[in-house]
Amino acid sequence: MLNDSFTLVLDIGTSSVRAALYDSNAEVVPETFVKNERRLSETDDGGAEIDAFEALEQVLAAIDEVTVKSGGRTIGLAAASSFWHSLVGIDADGNPTTKVYAWAENRPAKYVAELREQFDEAEVHNRTGAPFHSSFWPAKLLWLRSEQPGNYARTVRWISFSDFVLLKFSGKLRTSVSMASATGIFDQRRCVWDDELIRFLDLKFENFPSIVESDGETFVPADDYARRWPSLANTNWFPAIGDGAANSIGADCVESEKAALMIGTSGAMRVAYEGEVPETIPEGLWCYRIDRRRVIIGGALSDGGGLFRWLKDNLRLIGTDDEIEDEIAKRRPAEHGLTFLPFLFGERSTGYHENAHGAVLGLRSTTDAVDIVQAGLESVAYRFAEIFDRLNRVVDVREIVASGGALRESPVWTQIIADVLGRDLFLPDTREASSRGAVLWALETAGTALRTEPDSIPDGALFAFEADKTLAYDDARRLHEETYKRLIG
């Protein structure tokens, strides 16, 4: 039956909500694709938030539009990927008591020190897969308890935004292993909420959403939404999986020898595989889950495509993006002599210094704006190289698959990263990797085989590293790392 139906997919990001129908071979139905842009509210004191009901309405509007465009197609499944690390409180009626706080929320940073005083961070990191950082729930909850006591007291559940969406759709408060695994309060090996951290926070298990008993657990729309979307009345909805997990699946990176490197607004490099959590999770990396069978380990950068856009906007470069790219391509690796620290939004991997700031050192009278942009792009590549080195302590990465709008729009940046890593990068033509990953995961979990096998080698572009440039970047990377340790680490 499901082979003759379609899957509705939501990709809930911090900067947009995407939705579309996919067929039984995990191919998008182009005329149903919807993308609604949005922005997080950034506060002067480091906040990154969005109103829960406003964010919900954006999701509902996307579904409205897809169902109109569906043309009467049978929709058997609904799947979603959603941004990891979000936190929102709800009261006994399921209404939000706080804003939705995203991964970039930095106001809880000062509470990280309290966590480090109370716990052995290495031990907690090896159990939960998450270092102490403002991105994760423990610091956020300490911050809310201290600085929003009224809202905190009214809260009966602490949940992810995707859990809030599912609650409103179905009336059920559940979360997936994938979403729970990236909260920083989840035991990666036992697949349960972490009791030691919960006791420290003076909370109880019932203050968090129930984790689905099996990865295949689904829900049906509540009556109000069944009436709003008749074509979805009998659709089986899966709880969302994390956007990074979905992206790795969509990029066909679910083997320990293959790494997925993604740059959108932010950036990440991950390896996903079926098996056990490493006995020791390397310092500076995180470890989450796709589901109960598969682990995903890697590092994340707060500054990715957002940094590139910031540089272009604020340096007021003359020329089109293509002309800027062409100019950078003419220049030798790191010949500008600059050292750039790409921490406009603080640091996540590998040092997790949330109070880190960006910096440019080595400015001279001959430095121009393109030099600074080039140095910024190279610095992000150096941070990826640090993640890559640590990943290779637990796996043997032989292939790197790239994805993300920032890399598609900047072949020069993709080539820089390949040269810094000293590895070829393959950038497949597959668009919307997170959406595709969510539908592939849903079809697999539902026990539905694809009608035809996907191409073993998808179309795309290969960015082959140039050995002489890699050598040049080795020296620049060492200087970058020395400067990082002196000023930040």
Image (cartoon, rainbow, N blue to C red):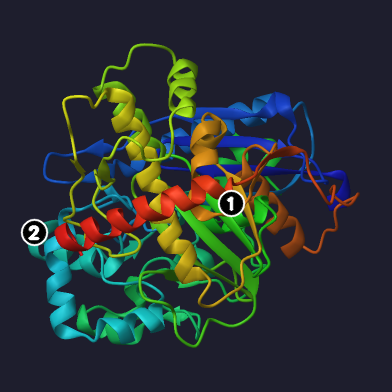
Residue at x 26% of width, y 65% of height: 133
Label 2 Cα neighbours within 10 Å, binned few <14 / some 14-19 / many ≥20: few
- Rendered-image quadrant of the C terminus: bottom left
| N-term mark: 1 or 2 | 2
Residue 454 located left or right of residue 126: right
Residue at x 47% of width, y 24% of height: 325
Residue ID for mark 1:
247
Looking at this rendering, what residue extends furthest in the top direction? 319
Q: Nearer the viewer, mark 1 or mark 2?
A: 1
Label 1 Cα neighbours within 10 Å, binned few <14 / some 14-19 / many ≥20: many
Q: Nearer the viewer, residue 134 or 384?
A: 384
Task: Please determine whether, in this image, residue 415 is positioned above or below residue 236.
Answer: above
Q: Position of residue 45 (x, y in %)?
A: 11, 45
Q: Position of residue 422 (x, y in %)?
A: 55, 54
Residue ID for mark 2:
147
User: Is any atom of residue 461 visible in this view?
Assistant: yes
Q: Position of residue 392 (x, y in %)?
A: 53, 71
Type of amino acid under label 2: Glu
- Looking at the rendered structure, the secondary structure element under dot 1 is helix
Looking at this rendering, what residue extends furthest in the right direction? 452
User: Is any atom of residue 173 visible in this view?
Assistant: no
